Image (cartoon, helix red, strand yellow):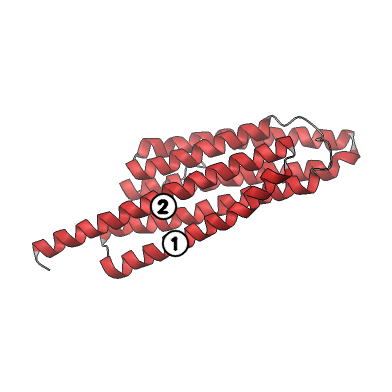
Amino acid sequence: MDRSDFTEKKVVFEEKMSWLQEKLQQMGSLVEEAIANSIDALKRQDLELARAVINGDDIIDNLEHEIEEKILEVIATQQPMARDLRRVVTLFKMISDLERMADYATSISQITLRIADQPLIKPLVDIPRMAILSQKMVKQALDAYVREDVELAAAVGQDDDEVDKLFGQIFRELLTVMMENPKTITQATQLLFVGRWLERISDHATNIAEEVIFLVTGEKRNLNE
């Protein structure tokens, strides 16, 4: 391949990567919205909003498939090497993490449908805090990828620690509620699942941040330590 052919191929590759990054940001925005709406629906026991989150999961799934197909096309036609290949593979892993986050938001909304006819056993304080942090982590991890910013990616791990602390607090509070009133066990257990799924969302955001660090530095770093 002469230099002009190489340059042209690189231009095409960058154009395709730009399209993929736009779609990634679109998917990320939908996931952030799903997380926010799932918790808002839970707080307000809003069945319509919960169903909207559940129905919106298909849109996110379809977007994931669209991005997957384009990634496979890029690999097949552009045959990226070295760092360019890492960029593509990293993106492929990221959309998988985003899809799992959307699934957790759907699961939270399904819980809202199950307990909507019951008064909440306690005001929701720490669960919304977890959700806000999780949304922030998703956005920060995606921004770190686009900017290839290692420091921004590493900061995601700090928020993950805070999410873990909040979940521990929720666990202790709900355990106390259940012990004091066994009639609350069913709903308290459902709320524990909500906390656990928000924790898992933050773990997936951390996965993305770790992939960004590997992409930029070639170093495998565990941000959950």
Provide the secondary structure element on which disc 2 rests: helix
Q: Position of residue 121 (x, y in %)?
A: 82, 34
Q: Which mark is residue 23?
A: 2
Q: Is residue 83 visible?
A: no
Q: Residue furthest front?
A: 48
Q: Which residue is more in the foreground, 83 or 1? A: 1
Residue at left offset 49%, top offset 44%: 29
Image side of residue 197 versus residue 187, left or right: left
Amino acid bearing label 2: Lys
Image side of residue 197 versus residue 24, left or right: right
Image side of residue 207 versus residue 175, left or right: left
Q: Is residue 173 visible?
A: yes
Residue under label 1: 66
| Disc nearer the start of the sequence (1/2) | 2
Q: Position of residue 34 (x, y in %)?
A: 58, 45
How many numbered markers are drawn?
2
Dots 1 and 2: beta carbons under 8 Å?
yes
Provide the secondary structure element on which disc 1 rests: helix
Q: Residues within 10 Å of mark 2 (few under 14, many from 20)?
A: some
Q: In the figure, 12 relative to 117: above or below?
A: below
Q: Which mark is residue 93?
A: none
Amino acid bearing label 1: Glu
Say which quarter of the image contains residue 68. Answer: bottom left
Q: Position of residue 106 (x, y in %)?
A: 64, 51
